[in-house]
Amino acid sequence: MNLIVLLKMVPDTVEELNVASDGKSLDSEYLRFKLNDPDEHALEEALLLKERAGGKVTVVALDAPEVDDALFMALAKGADRAVKIPADQASLGTVATARMFATFLASGGGQITPDTLVLPGSQAIDDLEGEVAAYLGEALSLPYVGVVSSVSPVNGKVVVLKEFSGGMRGEFEVTLPAVLGIQSAEKPPRYVPVAKVRAVMKSAKIETADIAPPESAKALAVERMYKPEVAGRAQILEGTPEDIAVRIASLLAERGII
Amino acid sequence: MSTGILVLVEHLKGTMADITFEMLGVGRKVAAAQGGQVHAVLLGKNVAALATRLGAADSVLLADEPSLEQSSAEVIVPLLQQLMAQKQASLVLLGGTNASFGLGVQLSARMKVPFVNFCKGARVEGGSLVLTSQLFSGKILSDVKLADGKGIVSIYPGAFPAEAGRSDKTPPVEKVAVPPGSPKVVFKRYIEPDTSDVDITKQSVLVAVGRGIQNADNISLAEDLAKTLGGAVCASRPVIDQGWLPLSRQVGKSGMSVAPKLYLALGISGAPEHCEGMKGAQLIVAINTDPKAPIFDVAHYGANADCLEIIELLKEAVEKKKTK
Ligand SMILES: Cc1cc2nc3c(=O)[nH]c(=O)nc-3n(C[C@H](O)[C@H](O)[C@H](O)COP(=O)(O)OP(=O)(O)OC[C@H]3O[C@@H](n4cnc5c(N)ncnc54)[C@H](O)[C@@H]3O)c2cc1C
């Protein structure tokens, strides 16, 4: 199979996020970036498919802080090819990003063969305009399913599981080529030792594909960005960990829970 | 300006989802400010009976066909596109749910109108619709304006009151035809959650662990505490994705909705997708090392502490209380 995984770097929400002085964007000064969680799962699912059904895994990303690390990491995990499109991800909205990927895939860069699966992560946490996966399906006129948690090749098609609510899942049969937004892989993303990534950095190369950004980059103009008012509903229990534990135990006893 | 508003009705296996009423409430609010009609779009297999519950809409546009069971974007999007034209609708409200995932994006691309994701606030301001979205797992809010009110909006579940979209009225029903086609995405069957180990929706005490529990070995500590409290362990998505606990233990948007007497959240940040599944708990106690974690906005009691430390101490404290 021709497996194409799209990767995106997103701000790490473990760090404090602040709004920039323009009041319309994130303050990038202290931002730390990490690979979007679902994208890491998309890569894992692609690697699992390659192991089971054979094929080639290509990872593609736009330029963003620390993106080279993510691309090398993907190669170290078993991806065959890594491509960077040298356009600044931050300046493009979701729609423009999807158009660039679509151009890449339609040009010689990616090539949609009859056994192609394009695997972006289901969603990114900063995606105000939506999901790249669905835009790509539309732009490339390919069938699309989102929130996918399992993919199995069966008779030239794939059978996928999509998550609904309440732990319910639906099984769908999808004709290839197709775009699947991956939410989680069937197995936890594999771990690769840092030494291996370092070795790959020395031996492998990231290709670049020059693709001009589309004209109107952002479809939606943000009027204002701000932090939510802390509702602060929780009453905070202070003291040493021992004090806290005893307070909680008392609360539970008062309410007849224990 | 055309001001028809379409609301895509959400239901799963014959049950209406609350998000439907939440969306109808938003639709009514916008229609009250800007004029126009609210149309509920009801698509599926054996769904006609659900129409009677959609009285908050001015009309129900119904397509009830076997082929529409869990039909995918390639069927629904062209249908919505056709209905937008027919009803001169400028605004389409969709549920921010897994079921509707991707529909808004594709519809917006076709109609060349903006798509707004994660919407949890809406107000009409001088003829424009101003929408508030939550980004970065609820840590940042962003306001966007839909000039002339045109757009496709994905409504965050639980953000708007469902009551505003309920009504005893019987709405007129109009049948719509589904264009024939041979879809490339075909629904096969539902796979029910496996609750053979523990049904977390039936527990009165839940010890919930998140990424802050750090590794698989620590799960057993939480299990010991749950046993002492007479409950079970559940988890946020990353813990399930790591394979530390089975899928049946996941709480949230894709997992279970729970409402226990006690929900003890250990090392869970409180992302909207998680809170969706637990905010109905009677008592929520959160332990998190980050004083700004959003979980403290939904918790009744909280503490800034290392959950690994608290787990052991709390177990001892509870055992002491019990023997007294
Ligand atoms: C379509 C979709 C569906 C989703 N469905 C679900 C769902 O059903 N359920 C779900 O949970 N999520 C779901 N998510 C994911 C959700 O957005 C969050 O990523 C997830 O809930 C975060 O889990 P977490 O709080 O465990 O991890 P994090 O957000 O990483 O938070 C970990 C927290 O632990 C704290 N911490 C770290 N160490 C300690 C310590 N020693 N002691 C105490 N605290 C500590 C940190 O301060 C942090 O707040 C979904 C996302 C999408 C896009």
Image (cartoon, rainbow, N blue to C red):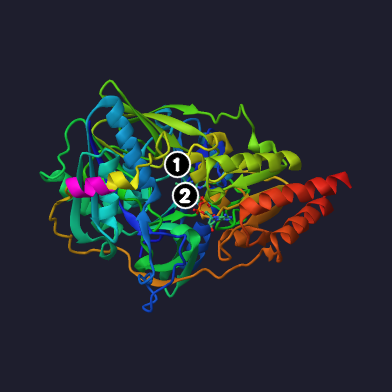
* Image point (63%, 67%), residue name: A232
Q: Depth check: B213 or A38 in front?
A: B213
The amino acid beneath tag 2 is Gly
Q: Chain of mark 1?
A: B
In the image, B323: left or right of A214?
right
Residue extending furthest top? A155
Any mark on residue A14, and which?
none
Q: Are the residues flagged by discs 2 and 1 in contact, CB closer than 8 Å?
A: yes
Whether residue A154 is visible to the viewer of this picture, yes or no, is yes
Q: Are marks 2 and 1 on the same chain?
A: yes
Q: CA distance from mark 2 to mark 1?
A: 8 Å
**Residue shown at 64%/56% (left/top)?**
B286
Q: Which residue corresponds to the image point at 83% horizontal and 48% vertical from the top-left?
A: B320
* Picture residue at 47% right of the left edge, 49% below the top: B95
Q: Which residue is mark 1?
A: B99
Q: Position of residue B130 (x, y in %)?
A: 43, 68
For label 2, the residue is B95
On the image, which quarter does residue A137 sit in?
top left
Residue segment shown in magenta: A198-204
